[in-house]
Structures are given as C-alpha cells and as structure tokens.
Amino acid sequence: MSDDLIAKYGDARVPRYTSYPTAAAFSAAVGPDEYVGNLAHIAAAGPVSVYLHVPFCRSICWYCGCHTTITRQDAPVADYLDVMKEEIELVSFAAGNDVPVKYVHFGGGTPSVMKPQEFSALMAKLRSAFTFEATAGVAVEIDPRTLVAPMIDALGENGIDRASLGVQSFDPIVQAGIKRLQSFEQTERAVAGLRSAGVSSINFDLIYGLPKQTLQSSIETVRLAAELRPERFAVFGYAHIPAFKKHQRLIDEASLPDAKQRNEQAEVIAEELQNAGYQRIGLDHFALPDDQLALAARNRALRRNFQGYTTDDCDSLIGLGASAIGRLPAGYMQNHVPLGLYAERIAFGVLPTAKGYLLSEEDKLRARVIERLMCDFEADLGQLSSGSGFDTGFLVEGNDRLGELMADGVVTISGERIVVCEEARFMVRAVAAAFDAYFGSHGHTHSKAA
C-alpha cells in the first residue's frame, strides 16, 4: 500500500464506529419521555447489557479522551455512586423490574477508584434491580497503578470474570510524555492479584501514535506485555484533539509521529502480537486462539459496541451514569455529561437523558453493513438487507466515497458483496464511512424502498 494512500486514509478523522449513527447525530429532541417509553418494552426484547460510567480518576493522563473528573477526595465518588443507585431504581421501575441481564461493564474514568465496599454495594443494587442470568459476565476497567488488595478481593467476591487494564506503553520516555508512569512490576502485580481472585479473562489496552513513541519502544512494550499472557489486547491510535480535550495541549505536538509512522507502529505491534500467538480480531483487537473473541471472529459472530469488538450479542444496552450512552432497539439515549446536571435530574425523579437518536429502518440497515465491515472486513448487502424492504442499490449507486475507495484499490465489489482488500484493512473505518449517511460530504442519503 503506497505512502500516499496511507496518508490519505490512515490519518483521516473518521469515527471508530462503535455505534451508528455516531453521537454527533444525537439530538436533544430525544429525551427522558422517549427513553421511558422504550424502556417499558425492553424486557420483551431479550437479555440486556448494562454499562456503568464512573467518571473519576486520581490524576489526569494527558492523552485521555474520556469524560472524567480528577479528585483526590473520596466524598465526590461516594456521592456520585449514591446518585447512580437512584438512577438504577428509576430505570428498573420504568422497565418493569424484570429485565434479564447478560453482561455488565464498568467503565470510566477509573472504576477501581471506588472503595471495595462501595463496589460491593453497587453490585448488590444491580442484582436487586435487575434479573442477572446465571452465567452473566461482569467486566471492570482497572488502573493497575491504584489497584489495591481489598479491591481485588471485592472483585472476586462479586464474581467479576473480566478485567481491562490500561497499559498504553511501558517505555518510560513515552510515559513521561503522557504523564502516566506505570512500571511493568505494577502491572504484573495487578494481573497476579486478579488471577488469584478468579478473573478468567484479562485485556490490556495499548496505544500507538503517542509522543516520542518509536517502532522499537512499541515492540518492547508488546514483548513485555505478552509475558503476562492476557487473553486479549486492544490497540488504539492516539487521537490528538486539543480543541476538545484541553489537557492534551500539554502534549508536545512536535513529538507526535506522522501518519506513516503511526501506521508503521500499528503494524509492528500487530506483527509482534501475532508472533506471540495472538490472533488479529477486526481492526484493533487481538486474542489468544481459544478466547471467546477469537471464536466469535472465526464464526462470523463478532459484534461491535462502545467497548470495541465484543462477544456481547445483546440488542439492548442500558447506560448508567453521567455521559453514559444506552442503546435500545428503537435507538440511542445519552445522559447529561455535567455531574451536577446529571444529579439534579435524578433528584427530581427524572431520567437524566440529555439527547438521543431514534433509528429509522434505513439507519438499521446501514448500521448492519457498517458493523459487518468493521468485524469481518466484508459485507453482503443482499443478505444484510433481506426482509428490510430496501433495494440496496441506493447504498452504492452514486456513492462517490465508495467509488474512490474502489479506484484506490482499497475495496472490491462482486455482485452485492463488498470486500476490504487485505493489505488495506487498517483503512476499514474509511470504508465504513462510505456507508455513513451523516459523515462529511456524503450527506443525508435518501433511501429507495423496494
């Protein structure tokens, strides 16, 4: 693949497509009333996933793009968790108190900033408000630098079976450039503790494109991380958006790698992980061959949601906490971001929905196409549109973005089957964007029903 194409597509500002439409399309016209109306039917749609957002960290990492607040005090966290418990009650009541739960994910921020007894109390509230399936999986995002033994015990006692640990890079030069100092030994101790507590699946997050990151430091990070044998890796490119995340202005832009160097880092990380026995899953995940994620990829059952690639097959996601996004069969709902406004809404007995998006049938078709492209690097438009009432010609006819990708050798089309060329798979988000009716100049495409 030429350097020109790498520069053209590799550094483009393209969504990660963990949802479709993306949050940029959400509107304040969709609020608490729409959420309550749709929650009333959620139990009938099958088991759900629950996401809980804990927006607190003890210190800021300069690369961070999450909604989080820095606090050295415990009281703000405790107050927030009390509000979240009230939100759980409101959601459970609106849903009829009998919602079956298959997956739970704690994200942040740093969920492990909670005190052990606070975490146990929150889990107890969830189990009383919803009906957990016997095999329900529970995952927690963890900062190894602040994980303590009592919290590890609480995770084990509450049946946590999956943990995701931030690593990013083990290079001390890179760590200094992002203000996140984390030794290999800290990470090793966290993994050992989680294993002893019964956590059966561990994921490491790595990032490329960081300040002063090199190919050699990327390789060394992977080799160290692979020694700890996590079941999965998620490898992300650093998104430098200082206009939106002011703390990113602390990063020296001159020390950031360019598009070609970023791509080289991504590929050398992938190569090292595969050499270590991990299988590449989709765009940016890796898993041991017997891991459920690898099995799902081989069986074309891989899914994609706000946590990235997943085996979570639920059609509904309940989002809890400030800024959390939920997904119902009818569409998306996002909570208020400011902590004060989030708490105020709940204090009035109102769900804190700030905005959302109700899906049209065309949106649902486009979402299926984008998800299969992101997961399988190919999509059968005929199969995906079966029973939808749409003639899929409108997806490709006059689609200038898609035509450009074909001309550049990024994709091929045979009949109604679109395939991303193997050497261009790192550009799959650009291919997905060709089917995004809201992205850039592609505009709002009007469907032609069959």
Image: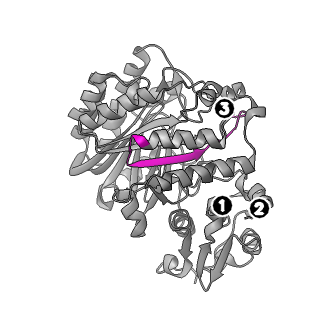
Percent of width and height locating residue 418: 60, 76
Q: Where is mark 1, residue-wise?
A: 427
Q: Earlier in the sequence, mark 3 or mark 1?
A: 3
What amino acid is found at the position of numbered circle 3 in the picture? Lys
What amino acid is found at the position of numbered circle 2 in the picture? Leu
Picture quarter with the N terminus: bottom right
In the depicted structure, whether residue 8 falls above or below residue 71: below
Looking at the image, do the residues carrying marks 1 and 2 touch, with CB atoms under 8 Å apart?
yes
Looking at the image, do the residues carrying marks 3 and 1 touch, with CB atoms under 8 Å apart?
no
In the depicted structure, whether residue 2 falls above or below residue 63: below
229 or 294, nearer to the observer: 229
Percent of width and height locating residue 252: 74, 28
Q: Distance between the residues labelled 3 and 1?
A: 25 Å
Q: Which of marks 2 and 3 is nearer the N terminus?
A: 2
Picture quarter with the C terminus: bottom right
Q: Where is mark 2, residue-wise?
A: 5
Classified by dominant secondary structure, the portion drawn in magenta counts as loop
Q: Distance between the residues labelled 1 and 2?
A: 9 Å
In the depicted structure, whether residue 80 falls above or below residue 412: above
Q: Which colour scheme is used?
A: one colour
- SS assignment at label 1: helix
108 or 288, nearer to the observer: 288
Most distant residue in the left direction? 134
What amino acid is found at the position of numbered circle 1 in the picture? Met
Q: What stretch is highlighted in magenta?
A: 227-244
